[in-house]
Image (cartoon, rainbow, N blue to C red):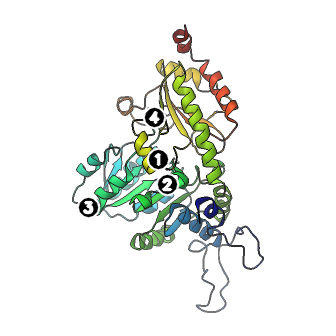
Amino acid sequence: MKFSTKAIHAGQEPDPTTGAIIPPVYQTSTYVQEGLNQHKGFEYARTQNPTRFALEECLAALEGAKYGLCFGSGLAAEGNIMNLLSSGDHVICGDDVYGGTYRLFEKVWKRYGITFTYVDASDASKVKAAIQPNTKMIWIETPTNPLLRLCDIKAIAEVAKAGKQITVVDNTFASPYLQNPIALGADIVVHSVTKYIGGHSDVIGGAVLTSRDDLYETLKFHQNAVGAVPGPWDCWLVLRGVKTLAVRMEAHQKNAMTIAQYLEKHPAVEKVMYPGLPSHPQHALAKAQMNGFGGMVSFVLKGGEESARQFLGSTKLFSLAESLGGVESLVCHPVSMTHGSIPKAERDARGVVDALVRLSVGIEDIDDLVKDLEAGLAKVTVMAGSAK
Ligand SMILES: *Cc1c(COP(=O)(O)O)cnc(C)c1O
């Protein structure tokens, strides 16, 4: 089966009792047992829930993984992966990962004796150089947030295989439609299903996918033992959202490409970051490891922080908000919204500058979106100077 078919059918056989074409919301905490040790494979809903199972099977199919496990949020899914480690273990992590991932590592797991080294993972040799005798895991995100840099998944997975580390890829930004890290050699894929997979900005959830039996056993044990499972309603909402993932991603990236090209020509814009542009330093890698370039576009305005202030809040369709991946367009100012906790000097050094703007391009009509950006950019006074 191809992707769109799997998104609609995998894990979602018609309900055997009624023929309901959509898996029901099994809103139950427990299951009646026929007798001692006689049951239908369902005992207690933290451990087994048919709505959750349907979602887990569907997402595993979409990532080309043998197993899927779902969680109450993307961060709960990440915590589940960290449960694979023990005190004394070391993790190499990309230095441009989701802020919440950095916080989870630095403020939570570090206290339990796990150590972290952050490296520029867009260079696989830097990952290799950071390996220590106790390095158990390599954690990357690609494309990264908000700079949309890429990591070479295949190259990093090879580095890890040599040293026997577990390679984890946060595939949230690409979605399983555009990138399948397991096929490139990664051991574990993690998603915030809150973003493209859910796709409608109405649910928080996470997923962990793997094809390794040994890892799955431990991950599944902790899913139940720690207990950060999603409720059946949330699973049902994600199942409804994911059915249209393929068509949504096509629409997202078509709009994103047009917008990236439009911005690149705009006199108020200094620089556009989008893996689909030939000007992107890793455009060739994007073509090789992704099946498309996604719906996220970042750009730097001319004129610094003042320009960002003039532009942000002056768009009407692009709503000022954190998050991404929904059908509606969002605009975000990383420096004051998602990356504010990083000191300015370090932000600047990484390229997260004051005039950086990140767009999550939705699937509204492209003419309306461009008009909206046009109106917002007209508020940027530096443009008047450069247009003269
Ligand atoms: C949002 C996000 C997360 C965290 O997911 P939640 O569902 O908010 O817990 C992790 N990684 C990336 C790349 C994200 O965008």
Task: Tell me where residue 137 sits by quadrant.
Answer: bottom left
Secondary structure beneath label 4? loop
Q: Residues within 10 Å of mark 4 (few under 14, many from 20)?
A: few
Q: Which numbered tag is attached to residue 75?
A: 2
Q: Earlier in the sequence, mark 2 or mark 1?
A: 2
Secondary structure beneath label 3? helix
Question: What residue does disc 1 label?
Answer: 100
Residue type indicated by callout 2: Leu
Structural distance between the alpha carbons of marks 4 and 2: 33 Å
Residue 113 visible in rendering: no
Q: Residues within 10 Å of mark 3 (few under 14, many from 20)?
A: few
| Mark 2 CB lies closer than 8 A to ligand 1 | yes
Q: Are marks 2 and 1 in contact (CB under 8 Å)?
A: yes
Residue 123: x and y in percent read: 31, 44
Q: Are marks 4 and 2 in contact (CB under 8 Å)?
A: no
Residue type indicated by callout 3: Ala
Residue placed most toward the observer, 188 or 353? 188
